[in-house]
Amino acid sequence: MDTISDKAEETTTIQETKLKELLAYLSANSPFYKQLFTEHRVDINAIKSVTDLPLIPVTTKDDLQKHNDDFLCVPAINVVEYMSTSGTLGSPVTIALTESDLDRLAYNEYNSFLCAGGTKQDIYQLMLTLDRQFMAGIAYYSGIRKLGAGMVRLGPGVPALQWETIKRLKPTTIVAVPSFILKLIQFAKETNIDINQTSVKKAICIGENIRNTDFSFNILGKKITEAWNIQLFSTYASTEMQTAFTECSEGKGGHYKPELLIVEVLDENNQPVAPNIPGEVTITTLGIEGMPLLRYKTGDICMYFDEPCACGRTSLRLSSIIGRKKQMIKFKGTTLYPPALFDLLNEREEILDFVIEVYSNEIGLDQVALYLVPAEDSEECDHRIRAYLQARLRVSPHIKYVTVEEIQKIQFTEATRKPIKFIDKRL
């Protein structure tokens, strides 16, 4: 039987081999990295191991946005899919994939579903879009096909149709945004559907946090599990890395796939942080042909944990996203990240839905406006909401009450693929 040290040594060998292959590939094929290596006098032959990566400058989201085409390493004729980021942190970025990259994507998600206890006997109901250049949609679709499980491609929204399909086709697992799962629960209550008597036993949660950094459920996770006896699996991924971190049944962080990715968690000075310390997730993709990335800073702030998991996996795990570097809000002396605000707003029964908007005032300071759908239109409800926010935030954001129809117009634009809960209008 392999020991933990044997597995670690094998992982190191695989990563070193793939890293050397990547550096040679970028040096030969990537206009962006050719220039970076020349400008910074990077000798790729001096990079012998993962510990040598700090000899190479980091790549930022700004680089990818400003020089998008220069990251392409193959002729256009070899590109079979053009996908794009959601544009959460600026203008969307196009990611071009080859046939080999699509195979890698399927392998990644196949392993993610296995990690989350998936089997060939499962039926997955996909409550997400498979169009609009959305990588996650095609990744889940491909991974489930590779797993050999059943699949229902229903798309996002329409709780009535989701429940009718669940009753008819009896999926065992749903793949959905957690806040939409709450809408499913609410619809079930209103229409007398006994959700705990349905076929659904698990949910793969995408796009939103369901856990705190200590692995406990946050407000969103609690609300789902208190109403519905299903097992939740948190995920973390990005279009650029073409890889996902998915929880196992232990629920102790998203598992790392070292054969697909090298991950660093860096501080403000681009130095590695210790386990359990927040830092920026920085990735080097392995085995990608179209648009591989080297020391790419994702903008996502997480912590990592390196002790072996009870499930038997020994590679590191990532926490939920604590926040995004560019989305940090400094408001009246208080530092806030959107996920913390999401938790506060999800906690209150008086608030049915919300959008957070951040903008700069006339002297360049951050200001926060909350668009809220109140449970009732009354002074008492307003007072409870304002008192709660004052107590929890110690500062008072501007509040504007809106209707369900108005909030949906804000959350869903023609280009959006998931509900927008945070709008950043800062200069």
Image (cartoon, rainbow, N blue to C red):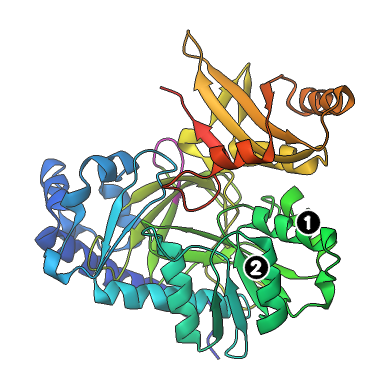
| Front label number (1 vs 2) | 2
Quadrant for the C terminus, please: top left
10 Å crowding of disc 2: few (<14), some (14-19), many (20+): few
Outermost residue toward the top?
363
Residue 262 position by quadrant: bottom left
Where is residue 398 drawn, in percent x and y? 66, 20
Mark identifier at residue 161: 2
Left/right placement of residue 78 relative to residue 164 reads left
Give the main secondary structure, helix, strand or loop, of the magenta stretch. loop
What residue is shown at x 62% (from left), y 42% (from top)? Answer: 339
Q: Which residues are magenta?
A: 265-270
* SS assignment at label 1: helix
What residue is shown at x 41% (from left), y 43% (from top)? Answer: 271
Q: Is residue 40 magenta?
A: no
Q: Does residue 130 lie above or below 329 as drawn?
A: below
Q: Is residue 268 magenta?
A: yes
Where is residue 39 drawn, in percent x and y? 12, 41
Give the residue at mark 1.
186
Q: Foreground residue, 58 or 41?
A: 58
Where is residue 84 drawn, in percent x and y? 34, 54
Q: Foreground residue, 32 or 125?
A: 125
Outermost residue toward the right?
380
In primary-sequence order, the first of circles 1 and 2 is 2
10 Å crowding of disc 1: few (<14), some (14-19), many (20+): some
* SS assignment at label 2: helix
| Residue contact between numbered discs 1 and 2, judged by CB atoms under 8 Å | no
Q: Foreground residue, 102 or 18?
A: 102
Q: Amino acid at mark 1?
A: Gln
